[in-house]
Amino acid sequence: MKPNKQTEQRLEVLRHSAAHLLAQAITELFPSTILTIGPATKEGFFYDFQPENNFIQSDLPAIEARMKELAAKNYPITHEDISKDYARELYKNNPFKLELIDGIPGETVGLSRQGDFYDLCRGGHVPTTGDLKSIMLTGISGSYWRADQNNAPLQRISGTAFFNDKELRTYLMQKELAAKYDHRKLGKEMDLFSFQDEGTGFPFYHPKGAFIINKLKDFIRNIWTNNGYHETITPAILDVALWKQSGHYENYKKHMYFSTVENKEYAVKPMNCPGSILIYKQNLHSYRELPLRLAEFGHVHRFELSGVLHGLFRVRAFTQDDTHMYCAPEQIEAQIVSSIQTIDKVWKTFGIEDVHYAVSTKPANAMGSDDLWNIAIDALKNGLTKAGKEFEIYEGEGAFYGPKIEVTIHDSMGRSWQCSTVQVDFFMPQNFELYYINNKGEKQTPVIIHQAILGSLERFFGIMLEHFKGHFPFWLCPTQIKVIPITSDQSQYAQNIYSALKDAGFRTELDESNEPLSAKIKVAQMEKIPWMLVVGQKEMEASTITLRHVTGKQEFGLSLESILEMGRKENKV
Amino acid sequence: MKPNKQTEQRLEVLRHSAAHLLAQAITELFPSTILTIGPATKEGFFYDFQPENNFIQSDLPAIEARMKELAAKNYPITHEDISKDYARELYKNNPFKLELIDGIPGETVGLSRQGDFYDLCRGGHVPTTGDLKSIMLTGISGSYWRADQNNAPLQRISGTAFFNDKELRTYLMQKELAAKYDHRKLGKEMDLFSFQDEGTGFPFYHPKGAFIINKLKDFIRNIWTNNGYHETITPAILDVALWKQSGHYENYKKHMYFSTVENKEYAVKPMNCPGSILIYKQNLHSYRELPLRLAEFGHVHRFELSGVLHGLFRVRAFTQDDTHMYCAPEQIEAQIVSSIQTIDKVWKTFGIEDVHYAVSTKPANAMGSDDLWNIAIDALKNGLTKAGKEFEIYEGEGAFYGPKIEVTIHDSMGRSWQCSTVQVDFFMPQNFELYYINNKGEKQTPVIIHQAILGSLERFFGIMLEHFKGHFPFWLCPTQIKVIPITSDQSQYAQNIYSALKDAGFRTELDESNEPLSAKIKVAQMEKIPWMLVVGQKEMEASTITLRHVTGKQEFGLSLESILEMGRKENKV
């Protein structure tokens, strides 16, 4: 299931239709219920009702059963435009629908019908209720009309729908896995990070979590160095005047943290671009220096409502692996090819082979001429093609300042995540009057390519934690190896192995407890340490080691040298 | 010149006396001048006057000459207490002195005399003006009475004084060197960092500067790992309630940046302790885990008036290499020994052998019993003694929450810098109700040792930049080696050497320009690249390399292998 736009749209239609099916079932089972609205959501659909008596959880099976009966009847779903007067007559006892009718521009409104049931609706349905067989209801919750707690309280029934039962089963299995390997749960169990009331939405990294974040930074830093990017560090707080010039103040204000000092207003940075641009402007640049790739691990703050915060997936402060590439226009394509290759390589390192590319094109509110846009879009498309990638077009979904490549990855549980982006920007270079001296000695405006590979390190950490189910690759683990002597008779032998591994730079622990082997293995297993080196009398006498992988797989009779060699290979990324 | 407290106090007395000498000279040369105050400063002294006609720069030599004449006269300097009435009579025409007299508690004020000259004064002078021979005046500037621009404008004459001419000469030479190697100047020339109006007091690190900061972090991180410290990452912004609990809000508010979000007040962290403590509190701790050493590269913001900002020496945001060690009380001493050894080793790495230790004891406003203080002070003293260090006692200069060790280093220009600190803290653990389970299974309050080795990475960077006069040690240089073929005939040979060095992990550049050798060397010299590998026809034929150090020293006939080996040694820190 790729996050193909067409598939997504078809699924949305299916789920919106399922919401109508739910409303139909409710109308039949609880005729006094007043209907409001029923949209599709990212994972399914819901319908908000005002029932005479509150629904309870145990009503759901009967409702779901009725939905399936109605689906089996295979009613055609039709759509028509009716006059507002007629609609008002139909809904004279439903204040919610009357309010909706008033809010719709024009003289007519849409109405969909299936069997006896009808509902006010913009349209977009599957042909018949027979297409709605793979459905399930997932829960009841409280809500408010128009999500405003000053309005009438409603009851929301949620559910999901798929094209067939197999997809529904896959979804349910994924949900179960995702709950089991929820990164918030693993983060606590593995003592990686915490969230605390004193800093809502701001992660606290405990030693092992901080270790992994630092390793990820080293990994990315290495990629930056190998690809000619230069790391910079810019301030966390900058003058509001700058954010006004960059357009962030106008467009992004509600997500920004402000602080007033000496009567001057400052903002905590929500993005790194202006800081990077100020560094660019410090020196005069020749075309010979371009592309100039300035990178930064930018720690940004973006306010989000506390209700939408979600572990490391949605936080209020995070670190971006952010790059700004100052290019001559004719360099865009080559840089895109290189960026795509780099991004691809990074995802492969994390075992992610299923990577999906899309080009988002000129939106309605775009700035810049069609010509400029076409050059940039062609550069993105050609870049992707030259890098050997297929891609979709997301029509009109670019940023107002330029087109972009969106990269979506698929994790081990089949879920999709939009992580990397590559954006072409004509706007900021003009806005900040950037220039370089071209080969004719004239001033020329560069293009900025904004690139993030992992995106948010915090979110990436959360995604990888779930993707690997807590079992990070060897090179990323805070503790890589645990040496386990079976009895104290082998403690000197174990100590020697431990020292040799430490000296060779492996992150190694030695279990010197008096517990039985099985208990020691259980502890290491729980700690998710990838390699256990078990040494008993037999191993000691033969000067060998038994390597027990965390997966349970065992390799016997290995020499210390071969362990070191294997470890070195695993450490290479 | 150690920053010995006694020496400092003697110097202060000398310089305050020199300020009187200046006032005496002015009174003789410009009798209508009204005197105000004349204190000692860190680098000398000043006296603020209200002259009839403004002094000009060219008056200074005559004033200085008169001061020297008065010094040669060897007037005894005496001190007496006089009644306020008498003092008011003496100063009836001097509104500033009258205001001072009113502000002094009690019925008498002090008066010092030398020859015909007298001045209102608390006391503390050298015995005679003959002790004031090694003086010089350094400038004239504008000031205001009581530093308030709503008050009368005054003129400030500044100068300095030393015990003898040799010390004065040393000081002047240091000043000259410091101006030549001012880190702000070097930072710009070497393209390391910049300061910009959009973020007053916030450094922007350009690629080479960011590289050095990252290297310093790696260096410290390595020390942390080797000494059992665990790195953490805590949020940049935390709830004001926490800062109230920690006491920072009450005591440090005017240096803090605040931001209000969702009607909740937050503060940008000025210190890292509360964040570390919140991590400690996330888990239950046994005595077996102690000392638990939680470290952090904490990026803190501290507001300072724009007037006192000074390059990287005094900024508004900086990164601390901050450690919080949660110890059982009986572990303090051993931890102090270890901390001192670590600190000592770090300074040695930077070529700083002259390190001065002092123990600051219980101040007037201290919390906690004398017993507790004595235990901690003894632990600090014993720790220093066991680490083989001499130390001074700074009586009453500890923090209110506990005593501390202050570590002062001396740079290559003889200046002293207080960088490292080790502080014992009884207060925060109680305040935040921290505990661990002791070996009897009871809850017990730990002690926190706060430790910073470099202190502020920003300030350290500035100090080292001046200390090394821009020539950082090999392991810290953004570019370590430049391969320079003498003519294009050696370009393949140079390329091979370059590749081998790159592959071995050295930060290497290759000069492929067609400039003459002398020009290439000049460029590398200006870039402060420590090693130039010069290869001409002779070297190529003999498969050797000439190593030219940035100092000018040359080593001929080296093999690539020996260069690699030498480089590896230099990289080891």
Image: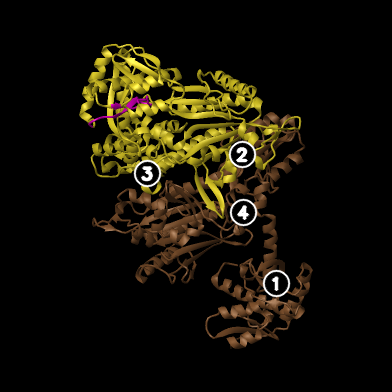
Chain colours: A brown, B yellow
Q: Is residue A51 above or below residue B154?
A: below
At which x and y percent is residue A130? Answer: 69, 81
Q: Which residue is mark 2?
A: B277
Q: Residues within 10 Å of mark 2 (few under 14, many from 20)?
A: some
Tell which tag, 3 or 4, sits nearer the viewer. 3
In this rendering, is residue A452 above or below B551? Answer: below
Q: Is residue B442 visible to us here?
A: yes
Local crowd size for mark 3, using a 10 Å CA cut-off: few (<14), some (14–19), many (≥20): many
- Examine the image and state in which quarter residue B504 appears: top left
Residue B115: x and y in percent read 29, 13
Position of residue B535 relative to residue A420, above or below, is above
Query: Where does label 3 land, which residue?
Result: B195
Disc 2 versus disc 1: nearer the observer: 2
Report the Cα–Cα distance between label 1 and label 3: 62 Å
Q: Which mark is residue A311?
A: 4
Chain-order first, disc 3 or disc 2: 3
- Residue type pointed to by label 4: Gly
- Measured Cα–Cα span from mark 2 to mark 1: 51 Å
CB within 8 Å, label 3 to label 4? no
Is B49 magenta? The answer is yes
| Whole-number angstrom distance, CA of label 4 to CA of label 1 | 31 Å
Q: Chain of mark 4?
A: A
The Cα atoms of the two marked residues, 2 and 4, are separated by 21 Å
Chain under disc 1: A
**Label placed on residue A165:** 1
